[in-house]
Image (spheres, rainbow, N blue to C red):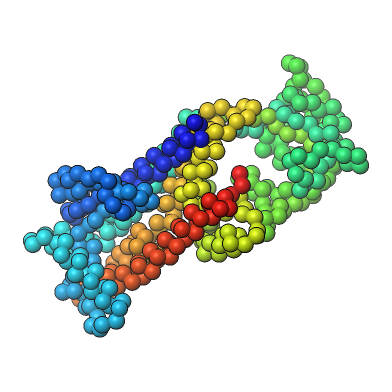
């Protein structure tokens, strides 16, 4: 039951994200006077619709997107210098202009989208992606401020008996011949709370970890609180290869997935964790980090799609960093909601699920800004090109150029649509026959 609930929650949030994305386009368009003839969530056959005012609101059968129909998206042939010719791409552009012109009612040309100024076009087209970014901010605020995240404390949760290799699997235990760990040799015990290390007051696990790594093999004093009293110890870390950590605490890996290591001081101790609510000021930084990580994934998307195809139709294993589709997202949601284990309560499951959905909205934000039609970024790029031409003409004292003939981009939009559809089918197939191991 928990698995099903997780999938349903993910589906509801995904549909709400799509619906609000389209609201982000529709509201400013209406505010600027553009007639919005349709607001639809989903594609394919219409399951339900109602007309309110001049807009038809509805839900379609395939919940993989949505759209708002703004009249006059393409300027008519009379407003642009449409090239002559009978090539297929020019016919596509001409058909798009004609269909767009038919949507404009007599006397409503001033309400066409193509008539908007460049700043207003940017507001309309950026409204959808920005709405996804705002959803991510709200979800992360609920996670960080309302629920909290597992946070390492300065109380020791584990004290290893030996120095394990940096690349040892989680299941690896101490064996004969392994070097004794200095923490256990110095008398540290699970439950000890570190008070000072080498004379420095310890306030966080990250701080303590940095101090230990920087110590090398020097002998330093350490004070811990044990059973209500302070105990003074001397510890001598060993220098051992350990994973290199990024500024955000994540492990640095090479392109082939192997962990980057460096010789640092090592005690062989680990922290306990407790759920702590974070300050509201941490939300922007958290969303910013997730956005940057998503940008790096989208920038490498062509290579990742190729890798996915090779793994899906080959014999290799699909990595945990592989891109996933809607089936994979639903599976992750179900497994997060149904995970069991010591210390795993509903709050931790809810936080993990909301984090995943926040990451999904950030992915929608970044992906929609790719400057290719029919994505929002394609319309943004066209508006910027149109505005740039007008500014150059103004500075040079030339007549104001007419609207940019965005209908010329329709063949590109069709090609991108087909390509995205093919990638979507590949993702669904890969998520079914070779799912990501979690």
> Which of the pair 48/23 is nearer the observer?
48
> Which of the pair 28/310 is nearer the observer?
310
Relative image position of residue 20 (x, y in whole percent): 33, 45
Is 346 rendered above or below residue 167? Answer: above
Give left or right: position of 371 versus 48: right
Is 374 rendered above or below residue 146? Answer: below
Kindly identify the residue that appears in the image at 23 percent across and 63 percent down: 73
Relative image position of residue 329 (x, y in whole percent): 49, 46
Kindly identify the residue that appears in the image at 20 percent across and 53 percent down: 36
Q: Residue furthest front?
A: 433
**Residue 63 visible in this rendered orientation of the protein:** yes
Q: Residue furthest bottom?
A: 85
Is 171 rendered above or below residue 372? Answer: above
Is 94 rendered above or below residue 383? Answer: below
Kindly identify the residue that appears in the image at 17 percent across and 66 percent down: 101
Q: Residue furthest left?
A: 107
Give left or right: position of 228 versus 58: right
Kindly identify the residue that appears in the image at 76 percent across and 51 percent down: 262
Relative image position of residue 315 (x, y in whole percent): 65, 60
Query: In the rendered view of the protein, which quadrant contains the C terminus?
Result: top right
Give left or right: position of 368 versus 174: left
**Residue 384 visible in this rendered orientation of the protein:** no
Q: Residue furthest top?
A: 228
> Which of the pair 11/118 is nearer the observer?
11
């Amino acid at each position: 039951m928990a698995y099903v609930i997780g999938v349903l929650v993910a589906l509801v949030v995904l549909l709400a994200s799509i619906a609000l994305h389209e609201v982000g386009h529709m509201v400013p368009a209406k505010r600027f006077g553009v007639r919005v003839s349709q607001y639809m969530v989903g594609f394919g056959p219409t399951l339900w619709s109602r007309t309110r005012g001049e807009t038809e609101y509805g839900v379609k059968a395939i919940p993989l997107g949505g759209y708002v129909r703004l009249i006059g998206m393409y300027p008519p042939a009379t407003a642009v210098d449409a090239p002559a010719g009978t090539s297929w791409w020019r016919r596509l552009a001409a058909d798009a202009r004609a269909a767009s012109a038919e949507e404009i009612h007599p006397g409503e040309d001033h309400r066409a989208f193509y008539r908007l100024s460049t700043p207003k076009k940017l507001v309309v087209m950026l409204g959808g992606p920005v709405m996804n970014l705002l959803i991510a901010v709200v979800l992360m605020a609920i996670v960080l401020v309302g629920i909290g995240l597992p946070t390492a404390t300065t109380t020791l949760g584990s004290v290893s008996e030996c120095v394990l290799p940096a690349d040892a699997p989680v299941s690896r235990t101490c064996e004969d011949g392994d070097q004794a760990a200095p923490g256990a040799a110095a008398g540290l015990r699970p439950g000890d709370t570190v008070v000072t290390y080498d004379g420095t007051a310890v306030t966080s696990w990250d701080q303590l970890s940095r101090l230990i790594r920087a110590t090398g093999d020097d002998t330093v004093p350490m004070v811990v609180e044990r059973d209500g009293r302070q105990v003074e110890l001397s510890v001598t870390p060993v220098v051992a290869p350990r994973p290199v950590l990024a500024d955000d605490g994540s492990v640095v890996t090479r392109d082939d997935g192997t962990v980057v290591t460096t010789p640092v001081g090592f005690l062989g101790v680990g922290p306990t964790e407790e759920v702590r609510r974070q300050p509201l000021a941490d939300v922007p930084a958290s969303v910013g980090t997730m956005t940057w990580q998503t940008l790096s994934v989208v920038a490498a998307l062509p290579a990742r799609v190729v890798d996915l195809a090779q793994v899906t139709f080959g014999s290799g294993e699909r990595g945990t960093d592989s891109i996933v589709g809607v089936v994979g997202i639903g599976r992750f949601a179900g497994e997060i909601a149904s995970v069991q284990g010591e210390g795993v309560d509903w709050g931790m499951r809810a936080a993990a699920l909301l984090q995943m959905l926040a990451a999904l909205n950030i992915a929608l934000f970044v992906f929609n800004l790719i400057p290719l039609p029919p994505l929002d970024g394609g319309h943004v790029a066209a508006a910027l090109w149109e505005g740039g031409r007008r500014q150059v003409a103004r500075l040079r004292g030339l007549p104001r150029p007419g609207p940019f003939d965005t209908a010329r981009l329709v063949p590109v939009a069709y090609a991108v649509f087909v390509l995205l559809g093919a990638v979507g089918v590949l993702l669904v197939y890969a998520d079914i026959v070779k799912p990501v191991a979690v």
